[in-house]
């Protein structure tokens, strides 16, 4: 389940010959199909995305995580909840998967939990009764939990926005019908020298215009697999009980601890 977290970015666009306008962050930006205007539009979108994520103190949503292998005609769908909280320079993120649906089988109970605290990733698998902990940073140098989760899930936009232009060629995607009123969409093509070039070909993002945060991420891998994440019923900067992030390991579960590898 190797994926890196991508978080959304956005772009307003029109397919009409004359283009259209949309108010972004208090200023009007003309959106056309002319490539010469694409970069300024994208910069405005990224700036507003950065502002929203910088001010993010807490976040929760329903999450639907689908993994498709077209060549094998296989598909799995996990559903659960996601929680994120940031304060005093520290962050916590938890994903609780609750159900699983495999291909045409019936959806059934499937408990799997991922907890990120900026230093440790804890994975609790109730099916095989096993817990694995991986140290990802020094205790005095924690990283943002959204950046840490990117090694396991394709969730973008909540992390370092500046890296997006460095690693991807970003293109505004045109939308038609009612969807154009509610969402902004970007297409990210992995650059030839990107750190992600061995894992992904491209990523599509859909961002909610009201929240200006991601609601859908679709990542296309170099092996022709597809990871799709949908974030539903989003709540931003609402109180989250600290108990949500507590790690409870059943006594009879196996435990594997992997400390941070020391660099020479």
Image: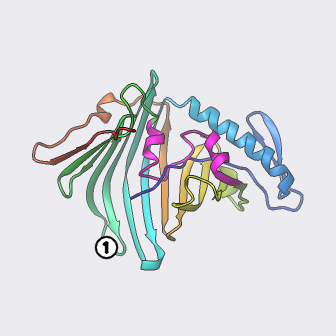
- Which residue position holds label 1? 105
Q: Is residue 224 left or right of residue 132?
A: right
Q: Is residue 255 left or right of residue 106?
A: left
* Image quarter of residue 211: top right
Single out the residue that lies furthest toward the right.
Answer: 18
Asked if residue 209 is positioned above or below residue 227 in the image, the reply reads above
Q: Is residue 203 one of those drawn in magenta?
A: no
Single out the residue that lies furthest toward the front.
Answer: 264
* Image quarter of residue 50: top right
* Camera-side residue of 163 and 252: 163
Q: Is residue 16 left or right of residue 47?
A: right
Q: Position of residue 201 (x, y in %)?
A: 59, 63
Asked if residue 67 is positioned above or below residue 10 in the image, the reply reads below
Q: Specify whether residue 185 is in view.
A: no
Q: Position of residue 88 (x, y in %)?
A: 45, 21
- Which contiguous range is marked in magenta? 145-170
Q: Is residue 146 left or right of residue 195?
A: left
* Image quarter of residue 145: top left
Count of numbered marks: 1
Q: Residue at the location (54% across, 54% down)?
A: 216
Q: Residue at the location (46% across, 47% down)?
A: 150
Q: Residue at the location (73% across, 60% down)?
A: 174
């Amino acid at each position: 389940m190797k994926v890196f977290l991508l978080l959304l970015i956005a772009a307003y666009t029109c397919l009409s010959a004359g283009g259209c306008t949309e108010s972004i962050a208090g200023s009007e930006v003309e959106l056309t199909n002319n490539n010469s205007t694409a970069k300024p539009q994208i910069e405005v979108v990224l700036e507003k995305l950065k502002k929203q994520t910088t001010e993010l103190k807490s976040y929760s949503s329903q999450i639907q995580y689908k993994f498709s292998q077209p060549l094998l005609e296989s598909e799995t769908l996990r559903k659960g909840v996601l929680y994120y909280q940031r304060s005093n320079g520290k962050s916590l993120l938890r994903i609780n998967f609750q159900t699983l649906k495999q291909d045409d089988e019936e959806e059934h109970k499937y408990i799997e939990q991922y907890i990120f605290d900026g230093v440790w990733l804890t994975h609790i698998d109730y099916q095989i009764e096993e817990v694995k902990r991986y140290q990802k940073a020094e205790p005095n140098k924690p990283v943002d939990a959204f950046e840490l989760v990117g090694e396991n899930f394709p969730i973008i936009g909540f992390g370092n926005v500046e890296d997006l232009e460095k690693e991807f060629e970003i293109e505004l995607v045109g939308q038609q019908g009612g969807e154009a009123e509610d969402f902004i969409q970007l297409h990210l093509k992995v650059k030839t020298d990107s750190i992600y070039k061995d894992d992904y070909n491209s990523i599509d993002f859909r961002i909610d215009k009201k929240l200006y945060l991601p609601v859908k991420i679709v990542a296309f891998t170099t092996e022709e697999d597809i990871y799709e994440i949908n974030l539903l019923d989003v709540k931003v900067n609402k109180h989250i009980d600290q108990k949500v992030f507590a790690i409870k390991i059943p006594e009879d579960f196996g435990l594997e601890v992997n400390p941070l590898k020391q660099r020479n």
